[in-house]
Image: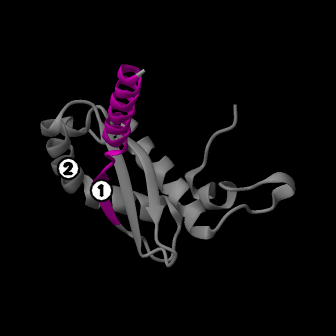
């Protein structure tokens, strides 16, 4: 089994066939940041407020100045609030880890945002079911 080396992340991520790089640099950096933050959640961050939290996606600006880290969490609104507090406390640790492992000239500022996509999809599904019920009632 090959050992993963975080120093090679930016070189290795996004390699397509025949070693050609695929995608923009900001996309490769966002994938590397997502992988690093996910690894931190599993192994090094011990804040109980971040238990059950997972990183859903990362968006990095084209100038690599800012990274928006979207996360999901099990539980209701209270869990979301607590996770936000946990991220706020851990943000310095996460940023310094990213700076050490990714070898970027400048480490992006990190913003942690709750990803409400799941709730939006559930709302839309409910609306579609209501429309379907109304159509069936008209028939």
Q: How busy is the neighbourhood of tag 1: few (under 14 within 10 Å), some, or many (20 plus)?
A: some
Residue topped by disc 1: 112
Whichever of callouts 2 and 1 sits on the residue coming sooner in the sequence is 2
Relative to 27, is 119 on the left or the right? left
Q: Give the main secondary structure of the magenta stretch.
A: helix
Label pair 2/1, CB-CB below 8 angstroms: yes
Residue that extends furthest to the front in the rendered view of this protein: 139
**How many labels, in total?**
2
Residue topped by disc 2: 84
Dot 1: what SS?
strand
Identified at 27% across, 31% down, the residue is 74
The disc placed on residue 133 is: none
Quarter that holds the C terminus: top left
* Residue 121 vs residue 3, the one in the foreground: 121
Residue that extends furthest to the right in the rendered view of this protein: 18
Q: In this view, does 99 lie above or below 128?
A: below
Quarter that holds the N terminus: top right
What is the spatial separation of the Cα atoms under label 2 and label 1, in whole angstroms?
7 Å
- Where in the figure is residue 129, as x and y percent of width and height? 37, 27
- Where in the figure is residue 18, as x and y percent of width and height? 87, 55
Q: Give the range drawn in magenta.
A: 110-138
Query: Is residue 123 located in the magenta-colored stretch of the structure?
Result: yes
The quadrant where residue 76 appears? top left
The quadrant where residue 78 appears? top left
Q: In this view, does 64 lie above or below 28?
A: below
- Where in the figure is residue 41, as x and y percent of width and height? 36, 40
The quadrant where residue 29 appears? bottom right
Q: In this view, does 2 lie above or below 133?
A: below
Q: How busy is the neighbourhood of tag 2: few (under 14 within 10 Å), some, or many (20 plus)?
A: some
Query: Is residue 51 located in the magenta-colored stretch of the structure?
Result: no
- Where in the figure is residue 88, as x and y percent of width and height? 20, 56
Identified at 31% across, 37% down, the residue is 123
């Amino acid at each position: 089994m090959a050992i993963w080396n975080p120093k090679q992340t930016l070189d290795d991520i996004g390699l397509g066939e025949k070693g050609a790089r695929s995608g923009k640099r900001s996309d490769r950096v966002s994938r590397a940041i997502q992988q690093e933050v996910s690894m931190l959640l599993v192994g090094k961050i011990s804040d109980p407020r971040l238990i059950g939290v997972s990183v859903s996606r990362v968006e990095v600006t084209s100038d690599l100045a800012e990274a928006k880290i979207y996360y999901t969490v099990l539980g209701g609104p209270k869990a979301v609030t607590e996770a936000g507090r946990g991220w706020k406390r851990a943000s310095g640790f996460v940023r310094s880890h990213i700076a050490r492992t990714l070898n970027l000239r400048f480490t992006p500022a990190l913003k942690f945002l709750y990803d409400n996509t799941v709730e939006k999809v559930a709302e839309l599904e409910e609306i579609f079911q209501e429309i379907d019920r109304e159509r069936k009632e008209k028939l």
